[in-house]
Amino acid sequence: MFRTALVVLLVVALSGASPLVKPIQGSKPWRSRLDGRIVGGSAVSISQYPWQLYFTIGNYMCGASIISSTWALSAAHCVDGFSTSQMLLRAGTSTRGSGGTTHRIATGYIHGSYSGNDYDICVVQVSNAFSFNSNVQAVGLASSEPSAGTSVTVTGWGTTSYQGSASNTLLGVTVQIIDRNTCNRSYGSITSRMICAGVTSGGKDACQGDSGGPLVSGSTQVGIVSWGNECALANYPGVYANVANLRSWIQQASGV
């Protein structure tokens, strides 16, 4: 189940486009198969995580991150089935849906191999560039996967419990990278394009509405909120798109 109260997009590759890159276009009815989440966290300031974006798609919400003055990174399942005209990014604010600056989407791409949980990544290009300041900055992108036990932080405005209410204030929670083999014993379907993070006892996680948001180690993004079994359950860590593994695709699709 995905980490958002969002939906899936129908995507059709344009003639001559790379088979790894699909433009965002078309639409498809909403399907409730998603979980996002910040559970067990606390309020944080946008100045601490200035790459965090509030991403609305139709009537649904996700997270995203700034990776350059004109490009943002999110999850494929957040945008799959929507047109770019239905999307809006908000930067530079700790408050859900207000403050900061808004940015329409000019174009975007999801991974050509995206299928449900795997390759769950997209990039979108904004029509009006981000103006960098203390509350608006690009995040670094991981080139190597962090080792098991590394402390990482996930942020967003998602629900604070499974099927609960979204937060009006940006929240963050610190979890640890979970060994892929351990994570696979829980889910049985963890690929190299995924990275897992949580706490063994549960109680800390992302949740509905956090999908697409960044998992960071310091100021480097290592994951994108993707899916999991409900939110913050013991022995079921959050599953994230693995930025290091997908780094070359990001560069190919966006030039970043």
Image (cartoon, rainbow, N blue to C red):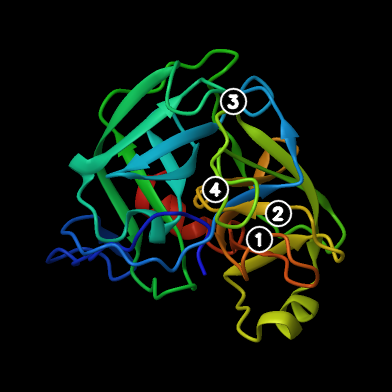
Q: Alpha-carbon distance for marks 2 and 1? A: 6 Å
Residue 9 placement, left or right of 101: left
Q: Residue 142: tell me if it is visible.
A: no
Residue bearing the label numbered 2: 205
Q: Alpha-carbon distance for marks 2 and 4? A: 10 Å
Q: For the residues labelled 2 and 1, say whether their Cβ atoms are less than 8 Å apart.
A: yes
Q: Residue furthest front?
A: 164
Q: Mark 2 or mark 1, which has the lower sequence index?
A: 2
Q: Residue at x 72, y 60 (%)?
A: 232
Residue 32 occupies which quadrant of the picture? bottom left
Q: Alpha-carbon distance for marks 3 and 1? A: 25 Å
Q: Mark 3 or mark 1, which has the lower sequence index?
A: 3
Q: Which mark's residue is nearer the viewer, 3 or 1?
A: 1
Q: For the residues labelled 2 and 4, say whether their Cβ atoms are less than 8 Å apart.
A: no
Q: For the residues labelled 4 and 3, say whether their Cβ atoms are less than 8 Å apart.
A: no
What numbered label is drawn on residue 231? 1
Q: Mark 2 or mark 4, which has the lower sequence index?
A: 2
Q: Mark 3 or mark 2, which has the lower sequence index?
A: 3
Which secondary structure lies at badge 3? loop
Q: Amino acid at mark 4?
A: Asp
Q: Amino acid at mark 2?
A: Asp
Q: Residue at x 84, y 64 (%)?
A: 148
Q: Alpha-carbon distance for marks 4 and 1? A: 11 Å
Residue 51 occupies which quadrant of the picture? top right
Image height check: is 130 above or below 145?
Answer: above
Residue bearing the label numbered 3: 50
